[in-house]
Every structure is written in structure tokens, then in C-alpha cells.
Amino acid sequence: MVDLEKLRTVAKETISRDDVKYLIGWRQGTYGFRVTPCFIEEPGEAEQLIFSPLCTNNLASYLIVTEKLPLPRGEKPDTRKVAVMVKGCDSRAVVQQLIEQGIKREELYIIGCPCEGVLDLKKVEAKFPHILDPVAAQWGKDKIIFQLPEGVVEVPREEVLAQKCLDCRDPNPVIADITLGEEIEAWGNGEYQDVKELEAKSAEERWAFWEDKFSSCIRCYSCRNVCPMCYCKDCILDRLNPSWIYRSTNISENTAFHLSRAFHLAGRCIECGECERVCPVDIPLMKLNQKFSKEVEEKYGYRPGIDPEAKPLQSSYRPDDKEDFIL
Amino acid sequence: MNNKPKIGVYVCHCGINISHTVDVEAVAEFASQLPNVRVAREYSYMCSDPGQALIREDIKNEGLNRVVVASCSPRMHELTFRKTLAEAGLNPYYLEMANIREHCSWVHGDREKATAKAKRLVAAAAVKARLLEPLQEKEVDVEPASLIIGAGIAGIQAALDIAEAGFKVYLVEKTPSVGGRMSQLDKTFPTLDCSACILTPKMVDVASHPNIELLTYSQVEDVSGYVGNFDVKVRKKARYVDMDKCTGCGVCAQECRLTGRIPSEFDEGMGKRAAIYLPFPQAVPAKYTIDPERCLMLTRGKCGKSPKCVDACGTGAINFEQEDEIVEFKVGSIIVATGFDVFDASRKPEYGYNDYENVITGLELERLVSASGPTGGDILIGKGDDAYVPKDIAFIKCVGSRDKSVGNEYCSRVCCMYTAKLAHLLTEKIPDANVRVYYMDVRAFGKGFEEFYDRVRREGVRYIRGNPSEVFKRGDKLVVKAENTLTSTPVEDEVDLVVLAVGLEPRRDAREIIDILRLSQSGDRFYMEAHPKLAPVDTATDGVFLAGCAQGPKDIPDTVAQAKGAASSALVLLSSGKVKVQAQVSHINEDTCRGCGYCVEICPYSAIELVTVNQFGHEALVARVNDALCKGCGACVAGCFSGSAQQKSFMDGQILPQIAALGVMR
Amino acid sequence: MSEQQFEPSVIAFLCNWCSYAGADLAGTSRIQYPTNLDIIRVMCSGRVNPLFIVNALQQGADGVLVSGCHPGDCHYMEGNFYARRRFTLMNELLNYVGVDAKRFNMSWVSASEGAKWKDVVEEVVENAKEAGPFEQFRRNKINW
């Protein structure tokens, strides 16, 4: 487990360095179980930092959405490092961004935080509704310990852990300049049970399942915006000319949107689950993304965001790639 | 200029080729209702002069700025109509074609359905046409040199033609000598010219021509670049003999410890050679080569106390330290003249080629009748004292040709006539010989062929129609078992010699050149020409031409004719000095490119690179295409998530409306 | 619409060098096949964006075909290898969301395989016929 004192000391040292611009971390939110990403620029602010099962946000998303404002003529851009706190899954996002040259390694200072799984706030808030005062949580052995206003409550971890964390294979950061705390033994088995359950159903049942989910989509694009791997400056799904999909929210356009989004993540999704977390209508997007995780692992032995030297799946091939579906 | 699309649609009858299944009037009428269509006409032959004039006039009079031609395949006439547009002052890339012949009228019988499909195809073409953009064709200089792969009669002829026209030729031959298959032949049908007499002068010419660089015992390793500017890499294999010092005296071969022990490739294994050898007496260059797979020194590192060839060579030409050499050069065009292999007769085990020494192939008999052959031109079967002159001789035709069971459906085109020629030569050499030919059909289609066939029959060669089922031994004789299908009688023919008229097959290593030059194979596995009728020497790869049997079986005059054709096609390129490069290249929108580098990885031609640009003071990586290297495949486009990479004339914004048009037409 | 009457719409993306030429050869050889399949020509199967498949199904196709050169024969050396990966993934995705597996097809047809082209068209059209009209996924209003 990450020791908070250690974290804050490291953060203070990091932010005091001349070559670091700011540090992206988590701090307690304004109410209830909420934890919010924060940008630390002064050593004093490091005291706000926390790392707990409530730190769900993948901070790697902020690495690539940073707005680069036009610079006055002659002014040099600030190329100092950005320090970022990453969990295991978040670190895979960083690796994949490095592979895709979204960011430069020398402009990063990565603080790795081995993670025992974050919480699904929907599950937590269902258990403890209507809590407005800030609440803290920490990992215990096979349980989560909440400091609720009425006192300490322990909950078995599988009852509140986010779905993606129940089968986590990468609790430890795969890339880091400094790692806080002990390495954690992975508990996931990579069997993609969720995907297999759906695969076992008939085509009609699968269509019915997704039709139900996609028809509720309001096309808020939150899934795309939060995704650390969706960083086109101008998304083709937004574009009017050519227009790949229309803006109307109906089953046809919604399905096309989700298929396109998922396909663009094939061999790239690092399974952080942020898309599913932010979806306001609870579309199980990870079920879609994990389908690809499963296929690329089974077919091509590939897992995105693990090896910074690996060639991206969709820009490489092997002459003997499987082709059993071809006529 | 007002660039609002004004489309002209031209629907071709193609005589009745299209109009017999497609209601072209209805298609034209339909097209006239499509958005942005100014005129829609139908005409009997759009590709004819008046047809093209129709388009040119409409461009002038109606102010058309886009043209749709609904006719045959764009692979056929896209260039024709692009020229028409250009002649009328319109950018040639404002053309879109709808293939309503090959993809519609010729493959469908139902007039109503075919017409409906033609309408859909025209609609899709029209929607795309209105979104087309003008493209500029860039010109690049052509390297004034040609590479010719294979120095048989085809390669030799092409090399001489190009060299005579004043251009540099690199003639690359895999074996130690030029000459190819023709040098193995004794006489040529139907005129009975001595093969060597007509070939050797040409062989000497290629060796002595100042414009020809002969690279024998060499193989093309790699070709990159594009039409007009190919970069070629050739491996000159080590001969272990210094070409400058060797005088071709041959003492080394006489002295070699393996003299007379290695089957000679030139004599089809019937003659023997040494480990250091000249393939045949008239070989060009007349320089010896050491066979690295047989030479004791090279295989075991030891040859007696010292290699005898070294001791014997008066000029000190032998050098066991020699290594392969890589030669690199640039050429503007390439001719592939790699020839053929003969069918391996052991793949027809029923004829006993592997079992009986008196079952031989036509090419082997060719060496036997040749004065330069292993027997000095005597027809002797067997070895030493047991050798005998055969009296009863049977030819079996179509061995390995017209035979689905061995995967060769095609006719090899030369076997009928070389059988007649060999039969004639046998009756000449063995006056009391009794020669018969078992055949399926006799195809005597060429100039002087039928006359020759007739002559051979009058000379007493019997032609028996029937495809023998097997050849087996009975006593001293071979028995050819067949059915005479003209008389419907079974035949068991006792003979002394069976000659299998084996067919021609693609080179067993044909794949290597395919991989290097991106050629296609036709169904018979020979290299495929760009068009069977109108581009028989061209290939799908611009600047690469075919000559001789590499493209399909043919006889010597046809081979020479095609070689001259290929040479002339290559010369068109070389002498014009300029070539237009692909205009339908990829382009990357640097404003939306996120610099992920997928396209860079994907591009098979390394035509894309990531460059650092300044975006409002910040450094950013973006991909950029080198137009001269881009071949316009569009693989980068489909791999680009942000849609920043687009292929000109095949943009997402042009294909999506095509899809919509086809959909909406349902 | 009864099963017999249903004439599916199939959109096919063909590479210029092999499959398009193979279809041309089928034409030159007068090999007959159903009219249901409409061809869009691209230079290489590597050019075909997998999202075209989704789009075609939205815009009215009951079946889609992508056809290119046999692996190793690509005119552009590698294009069909990329295509194979992309479409293997797209195929999995479509199946997973319950699109009938018969709707999306891929084939290798060379320039000399006019007869194979006919077989492919017949199979793809038959597949689309069995899958039936894909009304559930149609775009409401198609604008072209």
C-alpha cells in the first residue's frame, strides 16, 4: 500500500525540481466519496495529495489533452516535465501514448502507485446513499475500509471494486521513474469471463443486448473525451465532411458510433475502464473494449501498453496471421 | 471559374456488348436526373473518335467540368478518356468510370436487373465525380538504362535492340553462360536451321557490345524504386576464377580430379563435366567456373596435395578466396526474360522415365542428335559396349501439357513441332528407323508448320491417335500400351526407345522474381501480362516488361518477336526521358495529423516520414508523404484514425457518398 | 417481403490489381452471376477502411465483401496483410454485437480467378440472402 507521508514527501521533492512543471495527482473531492484530479504547482499543495481506492481517474488522459496555447513570437514553449501519478492500468496508457508518440518520455516524470483495485462509485453509493461529507477509504486485506461520518465500516472488496479491477492483471505500474510502496501480486487471470458469457449467446441475443444498451446512448461523447487513447485533434466521428455518422441519436447512428469508437481502440485499449465509469447511461463499454483485448491477445499474442518498444497492432502484421473467416 | 459541378454522363453501347443486356437509353435518361448532371448521352462506341469528340464538344459547349463514362472497365479505357478530357482542356482526373460491361452486361442475362445495376453503378460514379479534385501529374527523369533478367534468346534479342538504340543494358544471367534453352537445341523447326549457327553470333554480340554490361552467374537480389528509377541490386556469384586472367583454354577442366564425373546440365545430365567447367564449348563468356557444390577444394577444403586446376592454370586465374560481389545500379526499365523449365517426366510415373534408361525426354534426344552432344550426334542408347542404335522409336506427346492431373491445363505450343522435327532427324540419322508418334491432337498452327508436319509424315513417320496409358518392359523391349482412338483398337507397341515430348513449365524459382518485382501469375503460373490482347508485354508493374517463355510457352520466332516488343516498350520509356508518376497519391492534412506514426509504419514504400513542425510556437510531429515514392495504395489512409491521411481520388469523402448512392438506389 | 422475393444488396470493395481484374476476367469470359453485388473500386484492399463496412450496412447494404490479392501477391507488397488484420478484428466486432456473421465476407481473388470470383459472388449473395434484410441497422434518412 502507498504510504501517504511518503507520497507527499516524494511529491514535494518532485515539484521542487527545476525541470518539473507541475504534478498531476488526486485529492479529496468536495463531497461524499468523490476524489478529484488536481494539478500541483507549489510544494505546499502536495499535502492535498491522496492515494486511495477512490482514486479512479486515469490521470494519463490529462497528458495528451493539455491545451497548447499559441505562443507569442520568440517565446519558447515550456518543455519541462510533467509529473504524473499512475496506477497499473494508467501506466499502460502512458506506455501506449509513448508508442504512439503522443508524448515524449523525457517530458514525463512518472510516479508509480501499485494499486489493489479502485471502487465503483455506483456500487459504493448504492451501499451508502446520501453521504455529503467527504469520506475516505483505504485498502485492507480483502476488504475496503471506509471512514464514514458514523464510523469505520469494512466491506468485502469484491462487493465494491470496479468491474475492471476484479480481473486486474496489471496492478503494478509497467513504467515509472519512482514507485511508491510494495509490488502487488496480480490476481486477474485474463480469462475474459464477461466477454465469453456474451459470446456464448446467440447472435439475436447479442444484438438484442447491445441494441438495448446502445439505444439508451445520448451521444454525450464522454466515453471518447475521457479516454486516454482518444486524442485526435479533430475526431472523425465529429466531422461533418466527410460525415461518417450522423448526429441524431437513434439505434443506427449510436451503434455505428460505438462500433467505430471500439474499432479505433482495437489493439490500443489499455482497459482502464474510464469510458464505462463516466457513461451517464451505464453502457457496459468495457464489455466491448475487452472483446478486442481478448481477440488481439488470442490471435496476435498482443497486449497494448505493456512494451514501449512494441509496434502498434494495427500498423503491423505477420505474414502468417490467422485468416479462418476468409472465403 | 465557377467550380459548381457540371457533370456529363456518357453511356456506351459498346456495339451490342452492353446494349444487348442493359437498356442504355434508360440508363442515360436516369443519369440525366441525377444531381449536378448537365448532359447524359448514349453512344454506340464511346472510345471511338466520334465518341470522344462528343465528350470534347460537350465540355466546350456545355461547360462540363466532370465526366462520367459508363462503359467498359477503367482498367481498359481510363487512360483513353483521361486523354479526351485533357484534350478538351479539362483536368484528366475529373473523370470517373462506371464499369457496366465487364461487371454488368457481360455477367448478367436479366435485362431488367442488369439495367437496374447499371443505373446504380452510374449513380455511384456520378456522386463520386462531383467530388473529384483536379490532380497534377508530376514528371520525373528516366534513368537511361535497362535491366534484362535472363540471357536466353529473348533476353539477348531485347538487349541487342536496346543497346543498338544507344541505351545502356545490364543483362543478368543466372548460369555461367548466355544462350539459354536455345543453345541446347540442335535444329529449329520447321526450317531446320542449325540452332547454334543462328544463336552464337548473337551471343558474341551481346558480350562485345559497348552498351551491354553482361552479368553472368549473377542473380537479381532486390529491386526498389519505381518506373524510370529502379534501384537494382545484383549478386555476382563467385566463380573462383578470375575473369580477366582466364583464357578459356580448358586445361584446368582436363586436370580436375572430378573430370567426367559430374552430370552436365547443358547435356541434360547425359554428358559429364568436371568441377571446373565451361557449360558448353560456345559458351559466352568463354570463362571457366568452379561448381561450389562439387569442387573438392570448396566442399572439403582439400583436394589432394594441392588443387590440380591451380597447378594446371598457366595464368594463375583460379582463386578459391573469391567472394560473391554485390553490384548496384539504376535503370529506367526492366525486362523479365527468365524462360521456362521443362516438365519433370518423373511426375508421370506410368511412362517409366525413372525406371528405364531408354525412356528419355525430347530435350534429352535433342542433345543426342546434336553434334555437340554427349555422343557427338550419334543416336546411341545405353553406355559403353552395351550401347545400341534404336530402330523402333515411339514419341508420346502432351507429357505434362493439357493434363489436369499434373496441374497443367495449357498447351505447351512447341511439343508438336519439336516432335515432328526430332522424328525427322531420327529418320535422317537412322535410315531404317521405324518412328511413330502417339498424339492427342496435332497442332501445326504456325508459319510453315503444317507443311513440315506433312513432310514428316511423307517421310514415313506414323502418327497414331491415342494417349498411351503406360510404358512397361517386356524382354529387351519397351511396350507402349495405348488405344488407337481412330480405329478403336488397343495397341501394344514394342519399341527400343520412348521419347516423351515434355511440355514447358514456369521456372521452379519463378516466385523469387514475383517477390522482387511484384508481378502476378496467370492461371498457368506463368508471369501475367497487363492485358492478354492489348498489353501482352507489359505487366501490372509500370516499367517492367515480359519477353519469351516467362510469360507463357512459345516458340523461337514468337519469343524473338515478343522480345523485340518488350525492347520497344522499354525504349519508349528510355527515349522519352520523362515519365509521369502516380498522381493518385496519399496526402496528409498536417492540421489534424496527430503524429502517431501508424502510417509511417504501414507504408510499404517508406514514402511517409514524421517531421517536426512549428505549431504556434510549439513543436509537433506530423506525417508527410513523399509524392515521388508514394505508389498510391492507400494503406496508410485506412490506418489513419484521424482521417488525416487521404488518397487523392480515393478519399473517404468520395467513397462514402459512393456507398450511400449504392444504398439509396435499393 | 417473403424469403424468396428478397433480393439482398451487397456492396463490395475490390482492389484494382487482383480482385477487380478477376471480376473483369469473369466479364471477359462471360461467366454469369447474380446482379445483387455492386463493386466499388479501390487501389488496394489495404485502402478499405473497416468503418466502410459499418457505413455500408447503415446505408442499405445487407452484405459487404472486401476482396484483395492473395496473401503475398499484393501489388503493393503488404496492403492485404494490413487489411487482413483490420478485417479480422472488424469481423469479430460485428459478430460480437450480433450482426449476422454472414453479412460480412472477405475473399482473396486473383486477376486470373474469374471463375472463383463468380463463386465468391454467389456465396456472398447467398449469405446475404440468408441473413435477410438488415432493417434494424438502417440509417433513417440517407442523404447523398
Image: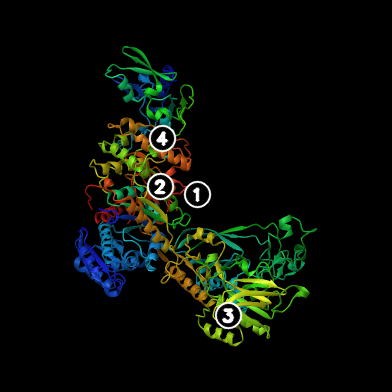
Q: Is residue B144 left or right of residue B270?
A: left
Mark 2–mark 1 distance (CA, rounded to whole Å): 14 Å
- Badge 4 marks a residue whose secondary structure is loop
- Badge 1 marks a residue whose secondary structure is loop
Residue B163: which numbered mark, if any? none
Specify the subunit that label 2 lies on. Answer: C
Q: Is residue B521 left or right of residue A49?
A: right
Specify the subunit that label 4 lies on. Answer: A
Circle 1 residue:
A320
Residue A12 is situated, as x and y percent measured from the top left of the image, at 40, 20
Q: Say which label, 4 or 1, has the lower sequence index.
A: 4
Residue B322 is situated, as x and y percent measured from the top left of the image, at 67, 58
Residue A6 is situated, as x and y percent measured from the top left of the image, at 44, 18
Mark 4–mark 1 distance (CA, rounded to whole Å): 25 Å
**Quarter where residue A66 is shown:** top left
What's the residue type where badge 4 is placed? Ile
Mark 3–mark 2 distance (CA, rounded to whole Å): 59 Å
Circle 3 residue:
B464
Is the residue B274 above or below the residue A226 in the image?
A: below
Question: What's the coloring here?
Answer: rainbow
Circle 4 residue:
A270
Mark 4–mark 3 distance (CA, rounded to whole Å): 75 Å
Is there a contact, CB below 8 Å, between mark 4 and mark 2? no
Circle 2 residue:
C86
Q: Give a yes or no on whether discs 3 and 2 share a subunit.
A: no
Is there a contact, CB below 8 Å, between mark 4 and mark 3? no
